[in-house]
């Protein structure tokens, strides 16, 4: 029921430490992978994307790593700040078969402790 | 603010009533998407439009749900004869055709069916 859905995987980090959030995907045909950040009461906010022909992409304080062999995606946040506290979702985009939707994974709650 | 806007932010209704939500996408985006999100879960795709054409519908979109985008700009999502199971956050997103895998989300409409 609802109580099961509330038990998001949680990552607690100290302010200033690096955070690593992991995501497994299942669709080999997915062409793009995107990380979103969702704060309480708000819609998902785009953070960074990576195309399937890349294995690493860096942004400002964030790095996404893609391992297609094991279908694994990770988001690294450097020098984590209190404002980074949110739920993080990975999403995959499969352009084949007429699909145009994003498929979201299970979110991870990031808690930054002062 | 030139982001995706949704109205209302919150809607409380009684079971059996009809509700309508509105989404205004980013002005230059010709793709518009509706997703539903329940507590602790990632957004689930409902339907999408390219300009005024509704091109894909999820099996989640029962015949009580209807979406329109009559002039290729704003969109409405109507739920008829609401049920308690319809209680969720309804998210709208938009994208350009070229960057369709990066979808920008609104803050959502929180629906509570009593």
Image (cartoon, coloured by chain):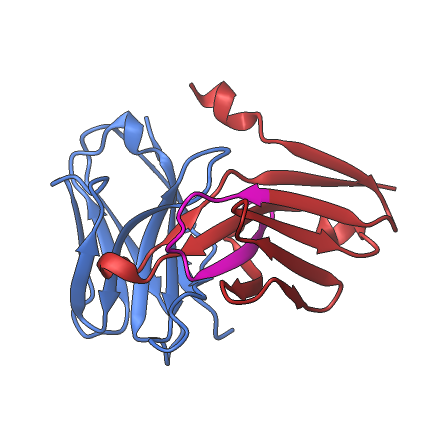
Chain colours: A red, B blue
Relative image position of residue A99 (x, y in whole percent): 27, 57
Relative image position of residue B100 (x, y in whole percent): 38, 69
**Picture quadrant of residue A41:** top right
**Picture quadrant of residue A112:** top right
- Residue furthest toward the front? A69
Q: Pick the quarter of the image with the C terminus of chain A.
A: top right
Whether residue A37 is in magenta: the answer is yes
**Picture quadrant of residue B17:** top left
Residue B111 visible at all: no
Relative image position of residue A1 (x, y in whole percent): 42, 18
Q: Is residue B82 left or right of residue A11?
A: left
In percent of the image, x 63 and y 43: which residue is there? A22
Foreground pick, B12 / A41:
A41
Q: Which contiguous range is marked in magenta?
A: A23-41
Foreground pick, B83 / B101:
B101
Q: Is residue B81 left or right of residue B39?
A: left
Residue B111, compared with residue A38, is above or below; it is: above
In percent of the image, x 59 and y 56: which residue is there? A66
In percent of the image, x 67 and y 33: which residue is there? A10
Relative image position of residue A18 (x, y in whole percent): 81, 50
Whether residue B58 is in magenta: the answer is no
Residue A98, compared with residue A21, is above or below; it is: below
Q: Is residue B51 left or right of residue A54?
A: left
């Amino acid at each position: 029921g609802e109580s099961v859905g509330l038990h998001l995987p949680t990552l607690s980090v100290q302010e200033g430490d690096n955070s690593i959030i992991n995501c497994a995907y299942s669709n080999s045909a997915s062409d793009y992978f995107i990380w979103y950040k969702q704060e309480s009461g708000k819609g998902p906010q785009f953070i960074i994307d990576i195309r399937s022909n890349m294995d690493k992409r860096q942004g400002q304080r964030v790095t996404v790593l893609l391992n297609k062999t094991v279908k694994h995606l990770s988001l690294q946040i450097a020098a984590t700040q209190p404002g980074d506290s949110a739920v993080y979702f990975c999403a995959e985009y499969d352009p084949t078969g007429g699909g145009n939707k994003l498929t979201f994974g299970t979110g991870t709650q990031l808690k930054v402790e002062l | 603010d030139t982001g995706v806007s949704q109205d209302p932010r919150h809607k409380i209704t009684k079971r059996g009533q009809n509700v309508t939500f509105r989404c205004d996408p980013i002005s230059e985006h010709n793709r518009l998407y509706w997703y539903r999100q329940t507590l602790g879960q990632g957004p689930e795709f409902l339907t999408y439009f390219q300009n005024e054409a509704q091109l894909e519908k999820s099996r989640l979109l029962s015949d009580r749900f209807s979406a329109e985008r009559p002039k290729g700009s704003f969109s409405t999502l109507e739920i008829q004869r609401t049920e308690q199971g319809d209680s969720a956050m309804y998210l709208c997103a938009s994208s350009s055709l070229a960057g369709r895998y990066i979808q920008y989300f609104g803050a959502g409409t929180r629906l509570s069916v009593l």
